[in-house]
Each structure stands twice: as C-alpha cells, then as structure tokens.
Image (spheres, rainbow, N blue to C red):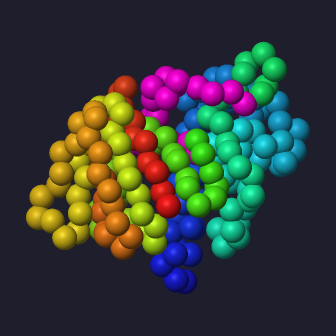
Amino acid sequence: MAEAQLQQFLEKVRQLNAFVALGEADPSFRQRLSDCANHQQVVDLASSWGFDIARRWGEPPSQSSQTMVSIDAEGGEPVAANLLSGPCPLPGQEHSQLLLGPGQLRLELIHSCEFANPPGFWYDQVESEWVLLLQGQAQLRFADEAQARSLKAGDSLLITPGRRHRVEATDPAPGTRWLALFW
C-alpha cells in the first residue's frame, strides 16, 4: 500500500473513531443516530456533522462543496456553529470536523482531550498543513527536531509535505482545539 493510501485509510479510521466517540459523549447526537432507520441515514447524519465515513479509503472525495459542523435541533438542517463550543472528547481521543471541503482546500476543526499519537506513529502527509491552536495547549514533535514544540492558543505553524510529525500531548478537558487547513 502506498503511503498516500495508508494515510487515507488511517484518516477513515480516525473519522469512524471520532464518530463513535461523539455518539457516546453527546446524548442529542446519540438520539439522532438511534433514530436512523438505515445505513444511508447514518452516512447522511455523519456527513452533516463533518464526518466523511461513506467513501472507501481508496476512493476520491465526493464533489460536495462544503460541510457544516452542527445541526439545527428544530429542523435538522446544517447550520454554522461556534468553533469553541461543543462537548469535549473523552480523554485520550480527538474529534475532527470538516468545516470546508472537499476540494483543493480542506479546513478541519480538531478537538483533542489528553490526546497523544501512539508510540512510533508519525504523520507523513502528501499535502501542506497550516495549523492554528484556538484553545488550550499542545506538544507537537517533528521527526527532524530533538524536542517537542510547545504550542498555546494563538500559535500557528506550517507543516510542509513529507515533514514527519506527531502529537505528543494535549490538554485535559475542556481540551485543545486546532484549526487545520490542508492543501
């Protein structure tokens, strides 16, 4: 399996894990999930919350232009949401929500709680990534640097394609929130 395909596969697993964690942590989301009568309704619900769980890991992204991050409790319509609200993931987990994409640009909101990548795991992406820490603190390590970088709210950095990196640590609840732009 090529590295790009491996990264697609791992992203699919991350999306599914975050989707499951949200179902366990958010009672209103869990109820909406429980109300689904078939697979397509689950896929549609996931998509409306920013999760891309429908496509197989080797398939290209769908051509939809934008996914919103929240659901209107009254009408079930996607609406804009406050990026700093929402339940904190369970300790050791993170949620990723697609705010814009797919396409040439992809914007994600990542919410981490006491999260760290497993020992020996490194992201090795084929795309550029710019990250902005919106809330909390994090330790981000690059394979070509001896020490992890300490990031706090307001800090940003550019990660070039192929620059191996990993998350060493994020804050406990209310967690660490990242804005990540990929191209």
Of residues 118 and 150, the one nearer the viewer is 150
Q: Is residue 152 above or below residue 105?
A: above
Identify the residue shown where x is 62% and y is 51%: 101
User: Along the horizontal axis of the image, is 121 left or right of 26?
Assistant: left
In depth, the one of 132 and 96 nearer the eye is 132
Q: Residue furthest left?
A: 146
Which residue in the rendered view is the most extreme toward the top? 74
> Where's residue 122, x and y in %?
34, 66
Q: Position of residue 100 (x, y in %)?
A: 60, 45
| In magenta stretch: residue 52 | no
Q: Where in the figure is residue 153, as x and y percent of width and height?
A: 28, 33
Q: Name the residue: 26% across, 40% down.
A: 155
Q: Is residue 87 visible?
A: no
Magenta stretch, residue numbers: 78-98
Q: Residue furthest front?
A: 104
Q: Residue 179 is drawn in which quadrant?
A: top left
Quadrant for the N terminus in the image: bottom right
Q: Nearer the viewer, residue 101 or 14?
A: 101
Please tell me whether residue 81 is drawn above or below residue 47 in the rendered image. Answer: above
Number of numbered markers: 0
Residue at screen point 82% across, 30% down: 35
Q: Check the image and report above or below for 128 versus 33.
A: below
97 is higher (above) or lower (below) than 4: above
Dominant SS in magenta:
loop
Q: Specify whether residue 43 is in view.
A: yes
The location of residue 98, given as percent across then percent down, is: 58, 45
